[in-house]
Image (cartoon, rainbow, N blue to C red):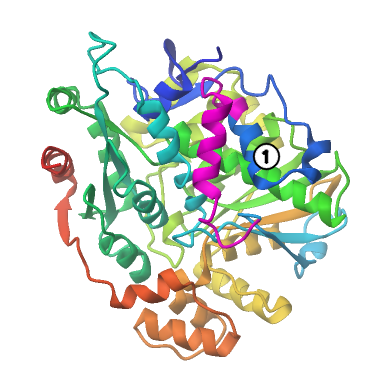
Amino acid sequence: MNLYHSTRSRAISRTSKEAIREGLAPDGGLYVCDALGSERVEVADLAEQSYHDIARAVLQLLLPDYTADEIAACVREAYDGTFASPEVTPLLTLGTVPNVMTKGTGVTGDGATSVLELFHGPTSAFKDVALQMLPRLMARANAGAVPASGSDAASPAERVMIVTATSGDTGKAALAGFADAPGCGITVFYPEGKVSRVQELQMTTQAGGNVNVCAVRGNFDDAQSAVKRIFADRALAERLSNAGWTLSSANSINVGRLVPQVVYYFAAYAQLLRAGTIKAGDEVEFCVPTGNFGDVLAGYYAKLLGLPVAKLIVASDTNNVLFDFLTTGVYDRNRPFFTTTSPSMDILISSNLERMLYYLSGGDCELVASLMQSLAETGRYEVPKDLLARIQEVFACAWASEEEVAAAIHACWESHGYLMDPHTACGYHALEQVAPAPGSRARVLLSTASPYKFPRAVAEAIGLDVSEDDFACMDVLAAATGTTPPAQLASLQEAPVLHNDVVDIDGMAGFVEQATLKL
């Protein structure tokens, strides 16, 4: 069986079920599998396959100890009737993005640009694709699991408390997936004042007997670092274990959150094939707005599984730590933190970069451990030049200022009549800055959220007069554009706020313990 181990050591092996259940490796590393890429998806068959078909094939390769029946059940439960589109992640062709053909080297390919809409799930964000799946994977991982002591294989499994920090979208998607899930509780932390009003209400109005939501005085990086310390707290783990609980994560540090995202890269390719935009084997570029690097890393996994990816373009906002790293090889979080209109990308510590470093260094655990130690101690690290060269063969990058984000929203609306949110706009701008890769036959922009999650920013960008109230902005935006806000967002205005806790960073562990023990 293909086993998982930490990015920082091969000392401990885990099945995929065990890796999903634990979330984070004991040494603080992320779980990886050395067999990734040893088996491939046959791209010639994709055009005839549904999203469900593709999901079953991809997940079976990446999670080999789940049975075919378990995978099929997870796919059915996650995607039957939960997404507004039968494609789950539909692809919309925009044509040629303005100015792309005049930038860079002049190598244009065909210039076809499409938008992969990832926001048709229950919370109107791309995280739904994975977080409708993760609770199902977790339930199968928990079934028959033994307590941490391992002393009695017949004993009932410990219950799992999901602990997650969110920069905006993961929190609600995780809450929606895990609310009232048997054998689970969920605790979500978000940075106070640094998510949109709609995002905040999505979390604070969440019902469920196992749900805990808490604002944190600090930014997302502070919260995520504290969550990692909570996972590493052995004394806390022992107290919770004695009460019948173990901790796990719904962030993309959990491999069960990451691997479902690989599916929609293949699904995009399948839709391009069906549309006649490409032929099987043609290379495609993907432009991905990202802060924590998980969404674009899923594209790299797809490439290793045989998807013909010409380039993965990393799009950043003003918190452009990834742009600087991919350009220079120096990762340095010692910089100002900016609160932007794309809050889910307001991140200075990109956790999933660690997995990319592992694979592109040839599985050098010692190097990865050394780089992560340097990041923890000094806030920076620098990769060897040969490693940077290998990274740059796969990834391109660009970033957008707040003014450029607004201009991109406006330009896309004026040129194509297509409304996009600020995160997607970062990607739209990036496509203007990065020349098409030689041999690329199409470009796909991943659209990560409904524009109605950020109605004020979007309305202002297209020149509408707006108020400070997000819901009034939704009405103005809908009337001016002829579009319709998702019902689950518009209805938030009337939903009662159920969670109003706020803690300092050093109070997060205590909040988790109290939340767990009261369930």
Q: Residue at x 60, y 43 (%)?
A: 327
For the C terminus, the quadrant is: top left
x%, y% of residue 74?
50, 38
x%, y% of residue 456?
44, 79
Q: Count residues near mark 1 (Cα–Cα under 10 Å), then give few for <14, some for 14-19, many for 20+.
A: many
Q: Quadrant of residue 496?
A: bottom left
Is residue 313 visible in the rendered structure shown here? yes
Is residue 293 visible in the rendered structure shown here? no
Query: Relative to 100, is 18 above or below?
Result: above
In this orientation, which residue lies closer to the viewer: 349 or 31?
Answer: 31
Q: Is residue 380 left or right of residue 501?
A: right
In this orientation, which residue lies closer to the viewer: 23 or 100?
Answer: 23
61 inside magenta stretch: yes
- The range drawn in magenta is 60-86
Q: Residue at x 71, y 63 (%)?
A: 432
Query: Relative to 146, is 352 above or below?
Result: below
Q: Residue at x 39, y 48 (%)?
A: 177
Q: Quadrant of residue 94?
A: bottom right
240 inside magenta stretch: no
Q: Secondary structure at mark 1?
A: helix
x%, y% of residue 270?
76, 47
Q: Which residue is mark 1?
A: 54
x%, y% of residue 338?
39, 60
Q: Residue at x 55, y 74 (%)?
A: 406
